[in-house]
């Protein structure tokens, strides 16, 4: 089982749960599993070509998946995934 | 017709009304102000700008506020800072035409943030906010606090707990609520994003950000006007979130689109400190995405490890065929001293980063001798004294006696000689 932290803007799709669980062997599978349980989630995370949107950050155990294997990053039981929309800011 | 058309997502193009929102609800892309350029073009001219107020508000037609009167602006004196022809530094570096855009003397809080805050607070008041706030590495907080005091708005500023003393004092004097957060800027920023979601405040660099960021364009507008209505060949710009660089690039192109200049041949070059260089590192490694870092540098005003506009800064630099580079903390201090000792301008650490990278790009042949070059100096050295205090020497201490003075400086009775 993978634990997935859901950011506030996506919680309307997860019945306001900030954390959900999924069974998946990769990030791509996780997205499909989340979408099956919470329809519409995939569209928010991925563009129409199925690629992750630029301002969506996904971390597996605190590491940005862009520095792992992207959507093919493998997942194992007990991994923690965070979905974080890009933040604003400026100094 | 209003000059502002809508807010538009930079990623997916979805449009929104011009309210206090900053993120696309569909794809999380950042929102940007979309203008009616056809309408603006009808009313703008070099003459009209030159006859305007002696501040950045002479470019009001291109700033995202509804008012058309300088009297309803918060911070009407911001900007129009000196463009200094840096002959000494230019000669030292081997550049024929080097300029320092000197925002160390911006009004009222001595950094380029007075530009963005003036726009942000003017717009925040138009949107009905009574309380303004920000997440800041220091300069932004100083400016928000000062402008809030002057406009009678309530104010909260959130800063990391390790800021330079002058930047902390530079908040307290205006009596806003100053909140020191035990963490770095990125922690402060995350916290503020949550607070902004819960309270109906105008966070200048969160929900007011699409308007706030536009204020940086005035650096490009002033550059063009002060160079005699032409764009420079090279711009060297410090990067924290990356927003300033992208907005200077945008501002130059707006000048061209409105027919105020013929061409934009400018290369925009980004400067970061080694201890926090996620954007410059991505550039060097040929990536169009960056890896967030934990900042560790004396250039605290640039210490943003997760830069919101990093992607767009990389894109603007690539489009312009510019470059990026980074310098060590030691080079930052050397850069501050070099600028002070050649041009008499005391910059904060971000200025040391800019001068250090300028020097590197000249050495690498990226910036050439005949290039008209502008270096953007965005903050004042009196706010970051800790960075240089151990490397500027001590005063000569003498007795109040002529003999003691002459001995110290080995000066003969008829003058001549000095140290």
Image: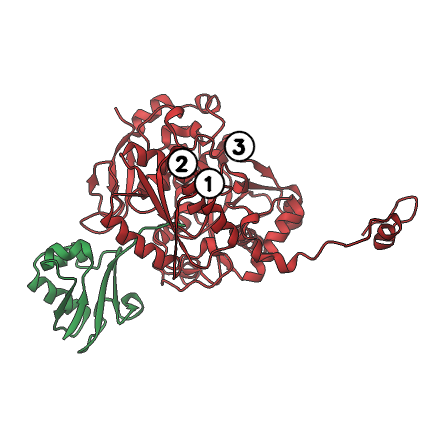
From the viewer's side, name the closer residue of B246 and B77: B77
Dot 2 and dot 1 within a common chain? yes
In the picture, measured across the screen, residue B236 lies left or right of residue A32, that is right
Look at chain A in the picture and name its colour: green
Mark 1, residue position = B265
Q: Which mark is residue B118?
A: 2
Dot 3 and dot 1 within a common chain? yes
Q: CA distance from mark 3 to mark 1?
A: 17 Å
Q: CA distance from mark 2 to mark 1?
A: 29 Å
- Residue B272 image point, x, y percent: 47, 56
From the viewer's side, name the closer residue of B24 and B262: B24
The colour scheme is by chain
Question: Reading the chain from its start, which is encountered first: label 3 or label 1?
Answer: 3
Q: Residue furthest right?
A: B413
Residue B14 lies, with reference to residue B390, above or below; the image says: above
Which residue is located at x 20 percent, y 39 percent? Answer: B16
Secondary structure, mark 1, is: loop
- Circles 2 and 1 in contact, beta carbons < 8 Å: no
Look at chain B in the picture and name its colour: red
Q: Residue B115's image quarter?
A: top left
Which residue is located at x 14 percent, y 75 percent? Answer: A1
Residue B329 lies, with reference to residue B59, above or below; the image says: below
Q: CA distance from mark 2 to mark 3?
A: 21 Å
In the picture, measured across the screen, residue B24 lies left or right of residue B125, that is left
In the picture, measured across the screen, residue A6 lies left or right of residue B381, that is left
């Amino acid at each position: 089982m993978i634990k997935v932290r859901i950011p506030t803007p996506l919680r309307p799709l997860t019945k306001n749960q900030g954390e959900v669980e999924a069974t998946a062997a990769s990030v791509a599978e996780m997205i499909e599993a989340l979408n099956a349980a919470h329809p519409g989630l995939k569209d928010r995370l991925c563009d129409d070509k199925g690629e992750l949107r630029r301002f969506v950050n996904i971390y597996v155990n605190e590491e940005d998946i862009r520095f792992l294997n992207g959507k093919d990053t493998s997942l194992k039981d007990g991994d923690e995934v965070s979905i974080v929309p890009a933040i604003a800011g400026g100094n | 017709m209003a000059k502002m058309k809508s807010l538009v997502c930079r990623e997916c193009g979805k449009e929104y009304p011009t309210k206090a929102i900053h993120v696309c609800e569909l794809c999380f892309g950042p929102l940007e102000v979309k203008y009616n350029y056809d309408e603006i073009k009808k009313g703008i001219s070099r003459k009209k700008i030159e006859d305007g107020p002696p501040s950045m508000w002479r470019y009001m037609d291109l700033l995202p506020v509804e008012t058309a009167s300088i009297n309803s602006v918060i911070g009407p004196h911001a900007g129009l800072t000196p463009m200094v022809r840096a002959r000494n530094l230019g000669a030292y570096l081997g550049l024929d035409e080097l300029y320092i855009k000197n925002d160390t003397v911006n009004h009222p809080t001595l950094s380029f943030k007075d530009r963005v805050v003036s726009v942000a607070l003017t717009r925040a008041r138009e949107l009905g906010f009574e309380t303004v706030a920000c997440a800041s590495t220091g300069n932004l907080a100083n400016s928000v606090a000062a402008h809030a005091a002057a406009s009678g708005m309530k104010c909260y500023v959130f800063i990391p707990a390790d800021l330079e003393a002058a930047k902390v004092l530079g908040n307290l004097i205006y009596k806003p609520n100053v909140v020191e957060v035990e963490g770095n800027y990125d922690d402060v920023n995350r916290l503020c994003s949550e607070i902004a979601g819960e309270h109906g405040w105008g966070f200048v660099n969160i929900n007011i950000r699409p308007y706030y960021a536009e204020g940086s364009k005035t650096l490009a507008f002033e550059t063009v006007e002060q160079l005699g209505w032409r764009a420079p060949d090279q711009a060297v710009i410090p990067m924290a979130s990356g927003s300033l660089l992208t907005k200077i690039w945008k501002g130059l192109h707006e000048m061209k689109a409105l027919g105020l200049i013929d061409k934009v041949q400018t290369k925009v070059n980004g400067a970061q400190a080694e201890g926090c260089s996620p954007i410059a590192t991505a550039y060097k490694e040929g990536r169009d995405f960056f890896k967030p870092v934990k900042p560790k540098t004396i250039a605290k005003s640039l210490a943003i490890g997760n830069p919101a506009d990093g992607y767009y800064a990389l894109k603007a630099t690539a489009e312009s065929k510019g470059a990026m580079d980074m310098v060590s903390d030691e080079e930052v201090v050397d850069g501050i001293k070099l600028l002070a000792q050649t041009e008499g301008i005391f910059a904060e650490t971000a200025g040391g980063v800019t001068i250090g990278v300028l020097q590197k790009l000249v050495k690498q042949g990226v910036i050439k001798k005949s290039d008209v070059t502008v270096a953007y100096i965005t903050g004042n050295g009196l706010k970051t004294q800790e960075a240089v205090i151990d490397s500027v020497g001590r005063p000569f201490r003498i007795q109040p006696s002529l003999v003691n003075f002459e001995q110290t400086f080995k000066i003969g009775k008829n003058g001549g000689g000095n140290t």
